[in-house]
């Protein structure tokens, strides 16, 4: 949680009512700050003012941009007229009429001359207000809002020219409000300045959400269209716990959230005291809480929160921060860093889980109609053997530095597991021939992420040293719900009885075989599920660094016996809603019984 931004002055100078928007909470924390608005073209328009002495120059710049935009529209009109005729060219005539509308022109000039707005800010603010009026009318007229956005973009392009700024150039604290952010853009956000982000698109299990949690940046996604309601520099509250974004907050709301930020700091400080204590239940069962990481530097964050190791290292993120294919040395350096930080604690390195959402490489096909069901994860690695072997060599070399284990993602048939093991054995032989040291007994595990893997787990279990339940994908594939799509986000639910039954079957099979089972999907980091998971038989949880203290605190305050009772009751329920209400109630009771930490 974070505040400390200059919202006081801004809160006073507003002319719009407070607006509360509900989205999907994907990374916890509350933050109060200034908006940095990136529309679908990635324009960044801060609320900036011009010095009185510069007003004339800025007005000239504005007038030049209007002229350039008019010329651009005329060129488009002429090209379309030549190609398609007058009827289609009329669209551009309408754009020109809007651009030259005397009232609009007067408003723009007055915003710069009388209110000293930066021309970019004046354009963005004024045209967005116009667009909003259209949007509030019926469907047919609402379409015209797009025309206004087109004019806004064109004016901004001409105003900003070469000076167009990007996310990379942020130099002061902001809350990023964007149409969408890819995992790669999220990974490259400057943590020093980005206090939080909110997007119009995005679903609960997307990798953008996962990166946000890894970076510990509060985030809300799937808000739907809202960027027209906000301008850069305006005060914003982002509540990553409730999935709320509050625009133009009033003083009372700001004060309430400031208090919440303070309370969270106190709670975090108390949870810090658990750091060196084991995650042991009241009836003496030791739970292993490991960390999920995407970048090597997160290992330190996990350790400082008292983790028992790294349970999931998502290595494909090596691709997100580099433009070229990582070399063996790149892989090795990253793994070596994590293993050294963990100093003997286990480190589970997952082989590349490329493909699916935006984590694409040159080796994935350009167009896949169903990328989640396409060439991703272990399927891609088995097709791209040089890439796979490079990674396995680095993992094997790193196995000499500590307790390294390898995890294959999205294994859904026994043939895939056997092929992956064969490649591993082959790489081992190769290293041995060259006299390169490695751990021949490197533990091998699979991610259980498809219903097929659960149904065949009794077969898989004989050929693995451990399993890790990838519930993010397991939920997606079981319920046939795209984890990154906000339109079906309400169906994406870890509480669904189908998911619970698959988990129970998996833990039962693993336990009967004496094979450790872990859950590394996001549900393991949410304390709502901790008792349920322990009750189902889970003893290993892998969670984002930020969730370690709280999950540990829950483990230490419950008994496995009572958790079993909770799991049994949940398993008897017929619907996700009922399960969720029950688990929420159990969590409230626990908090009431223990008193908040
Ligand atoms: C999962 O699917 O639960 C998982 C941990 O892997 P990822 O989120 O990277 O797909
Ligand atoms: Mg997965």
Image: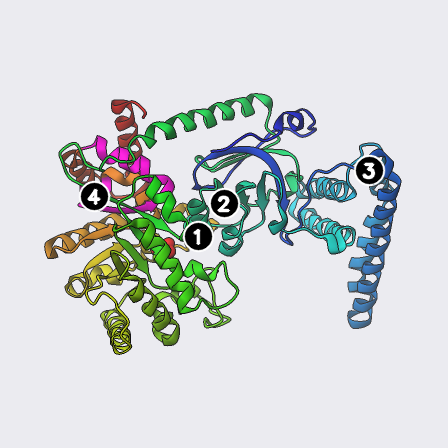
Q: Residues within 10 Å of mark 1 (few under 14, many from 20)?
A: many
Q: Nearer the viewer, residue 23 or 121?
A: 121
| 372 within the magenta span | no
The residue mark sitting in front, 2 or 3, is 3
Which of the marked residues, 1 or 4, is nearer the chain's N terminus? 1
> Is 429 drawn above or below residue 470 in the view shown?
below
Rate crowding at label 3 as few (under 14), some (14 to 19) or many (20 or more) other CA atoms within 10 Å.
Answer: many
CA gap between label 2 and label 3 equals: 34 Å
Residue to which mark 4 is pinned: 571
Q: Earlier in the sequence, mark 3 or mark 1?
A: 3
- In the image, taking residue 114 as reference, residue 424 lies left or right, namely left
- How crowded is the residue under tag 2: few (<14 C-alpha within 10 Å), some, or many (20+)? many
Nearer to us of marks 1 and 4 is 1
Residue 368 left/right relative to 229? left
Helix, strand or loop for the magenta stretch, by majority = helix
Residue on which disc 3 sits: 112
Q: Residue at x 32, y 60 (%)?
A: 350
Where residue 102 appears, x then y in whole percent? Answer: 87, 43
Q: Tell me the element at label 2.
A: strand
Is residue 526 visible in the rendered image? The answer is: no
* First in residue order: circle 2 vs circle 3: 3
User: Tag on residue 185?
Assistant: none
CB of mark 1 near ligand 1 (< 8 Å): no
- Mark 3 beta carbon near ligand 1 (under 8 Å): no
Identify the image quadrant of residue 317: bottom left
Q: Residues within 10 Å of mark 4 (few under 14, many from 20)?
A: some
Q: Quadrant of residue 353?
A: bottom left
Q: Provide the residue span drawn in magenta.
A: 532-558
According to the picture, the residue beneath numbered tag 2 turns out to be: 221
């Amino acid at each position: 949680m974070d505040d400390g931004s200059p919202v006081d002055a801004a809160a006073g100078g507003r002319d719009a009512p407070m607006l509360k928007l509900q989205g999907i909470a994907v990374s916890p924390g509350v933050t109060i700050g200034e908006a940095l608005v990136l529309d679908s073209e990635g324009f960044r328009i801060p609320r900036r003012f011009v010095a009185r002495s510069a007003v004339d120059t800025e007005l000239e710049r504005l007038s030049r941009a209007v002229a350039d935009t008019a010329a651009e529209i005329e060129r488009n009109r002429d090209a379309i007229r030549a190609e398609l005729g007058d009827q289609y060219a009329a669209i551009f005539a309408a754009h020109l009429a809007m651009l030259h509308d005397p009232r609009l022109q007067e408003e723009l000039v007055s915003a710069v001359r009388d209110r000293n707005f930066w021309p970019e800010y004046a354009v963005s603010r004024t045209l967005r207000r116009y667009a909003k009026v259209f949007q509030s009318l019926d469907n047919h007229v609402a379409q015209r809002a797009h025309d206004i956005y087109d004019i806004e973009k064109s004016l901004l392009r001409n105003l900003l020219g070469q000076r167009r700024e990007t996310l990379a150039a942020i130099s002061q604290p902001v809350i990023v409000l964007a149409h969408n952010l890819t995992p790669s853009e999220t990974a490259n956000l400057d943590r020093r300045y980005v206090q939080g982000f909110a997007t119009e698109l995005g679903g609960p299990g997307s990798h953008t959400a996962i990166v946000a949690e890894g970076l510990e940046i509060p985030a809300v996604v799937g808000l739907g269209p809202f960027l027209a309601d906000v301008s850069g520099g305006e005060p914003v509250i982002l509540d990553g716990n409730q999935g709320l974004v509050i625009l133009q907050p009033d003083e009372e709301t700001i004060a309430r959230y400031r208090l919440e930020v303070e309370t969270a700091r106190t709670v975090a400080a108390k949870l810090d005291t658990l750091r060196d204590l084991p995650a042991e239940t009241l009836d003496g069962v030791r739970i292993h809480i490991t960390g999920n990481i995407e970048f090597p530097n997160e290992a330190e964050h996990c350790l400082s929160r008292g983790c028992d190791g790294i349970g999931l290292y998502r290595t494909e993120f090596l691709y997100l921060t580099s433009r070229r294919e990582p070399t063996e040395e790149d892989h090795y350096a990253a793994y070596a860093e994590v293993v050294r930080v963990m100093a003997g604690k286990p480190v589970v390195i997952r082989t590349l889980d490329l493909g699916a959402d935006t984590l694409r490489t040159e080796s994935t096909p350009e167009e896949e109609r169903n990328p989640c069901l396409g060439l991703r994860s272990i399927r891609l690695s088995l097709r791209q053997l040089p890439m796979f072997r490079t990674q396995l060599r680095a993992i094997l070399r790193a196995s000499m530095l500590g307790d390294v284990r390898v995890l294959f993602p999205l294994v859904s048939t026994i043939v895939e597991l056997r092929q992956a093991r064969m490649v591993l054995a082959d790489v081992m032989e190769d290293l041995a021939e060259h006299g390169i040291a490695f751990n021949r007994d490197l533990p091998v595990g699979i991610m259980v992420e498809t219903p097929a893997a659960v149904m065949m787990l009794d077969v898989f279990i004989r050929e693995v040293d451990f399993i890790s339940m990838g519930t993010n994908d397991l939920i997606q594939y079981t319920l046939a719900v795209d984890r990154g799509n906000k339109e079906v986000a309400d169906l994406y639910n870890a509480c669904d009885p189908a998911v619970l039954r698959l988990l129970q079957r998996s833990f039962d099979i693993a336990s009967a075989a004496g094979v450790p089972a872990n859950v590394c999907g996001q549900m393991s980091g949410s304390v709502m599920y901790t008792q349920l998971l322990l009750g189902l038989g889970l003893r290993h949880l892998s969670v984002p660094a930020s969730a370690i203290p709280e999950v540990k605190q829950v483990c230490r305050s419950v008994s496995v016996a009572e958790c079993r009772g909770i799991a049994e009751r949940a398993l008897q329920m017929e619907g996700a809603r009922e399960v969720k209400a029950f688990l929420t109630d159990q969590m409230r009771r626990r908090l009431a019984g223990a008193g908040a930490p």
